[in-house]
Amino acid sequence: MITIARPDLRWDPWREMDRLQREMTGVFTLPRRQPVVAFPPLNIHTGDDDVIITSEIPGIDPGDIDLTVTGDTLTIKGLRKEHEAKEGETWHRRERGSGSFYRTVQLPYNVDGNKVQADYVNGVLKIVLPRAEADKPRKISVSSGK
Amino acid sequence: MADISKSLKSEKAQAQEAALAERTKDRLTYNPAVDILEDADNLYIYADMPGADDKSVNVSLENDVLTIEAQAQDVSFDKHDITYAEYGVGDYYRAFTLNETVDRDKIEARMKNGVLNIVLPKAEAVKPRSIPIKVG
């Protein structure tokens, strides 16, 4: 079972991001009228040296995804093309969503934009964001003296 | 903060336990979202199953029931904690009762970028045929 971590309630960056997300989310809709939920869904894995973000976006062309990184923010933009019925085809069921999506994610620390790597395998987008050198914790030695 | 449980339910429908005989493995199971289309010759099914590949997918047809099953690869990284999760990773299962007679030998299934595409050609006998009317 996935343990879903609840972030700190003090200053909630997710609430900020979520509000921004709601304002920004363009026209990603599911055919049945459902409340707009964040798309694509993200999981964030944090390590000491890098952050890995995985997202499930099946059936798109990797060329249709736009990733930008600034400091401690990752922006994912993209388009999932609608499945067009060909001449003579009728629909039985239509459940797969389509449309454009836009999300920004707050990262736990600054990352090095030049070293970010992303791949798309089996419909899962995986983004590895290495921590910026300047942001790595430094040990500070304390000298005794008068 | 986005209601995580809602996201999981809307995007990936968690399989209803009541409808499904319990599985021996204790693993999350999802019903993948599907698009089904039909034309004069074939039935087309597209199922969203991110994380699964052609080796972990199983499509079977028995007594007019088409069953789609797949396992998604578990994703976890050494020395990384999941600090925020909006989706779970698990198995996929969905079954359909076909009301078309299908030519079993010609069923084709293809897996690409987490989308399973199945083409089910309709059996010859079922294709509409106009019957000539004789006079007399």
Image (cartoon, rainbow, N blue to C red):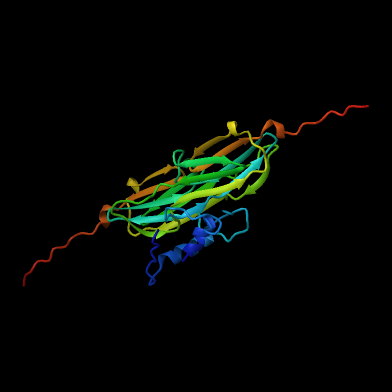
Q: Residue A132, position in %: x, y?
A: 29, 53
Name the one closer to the observer, B27 or A78.
B27
Query: Residue B62, can we see it?
Result: yes
Name the one closer to the observer, B127 or A24.
B127
In the image, residue A104 above or below residue B98: below
Location of residue A108 by image quarter: bottom left
Q: Residue at x 87, y 29 (%)?
A: B133
Name the one closer to the observer, B57 or A125.
B57
Q: Residue B104, position in %: x, y?
A: 60, 34
Q: Residue at x 64, y 43 (%)?
A: B98
Quadrant, the C terminus of chain B: top right
Q: Residue at x 44, y 38 (%)?
A: B55
Q: Is residue A1 left or right of residue B121?
A: left
Q: Residue at x 38, y 72 (%)?
A: A10
Query: Residue A60, can we see it?
Result: no
Q: Residue A143, position in %: x, y?
A: 9, 66
Looking at this rendering, what residue extends furthest in the left direction? Answer: A146
Name the one closer to the observer, A4 or B105.
B105
**Number of dots carrying numbers:** 0
Location of residue A136 by image quarter: bottom left
Q: Residue B17, position in %: x, y?
A: 52, 58
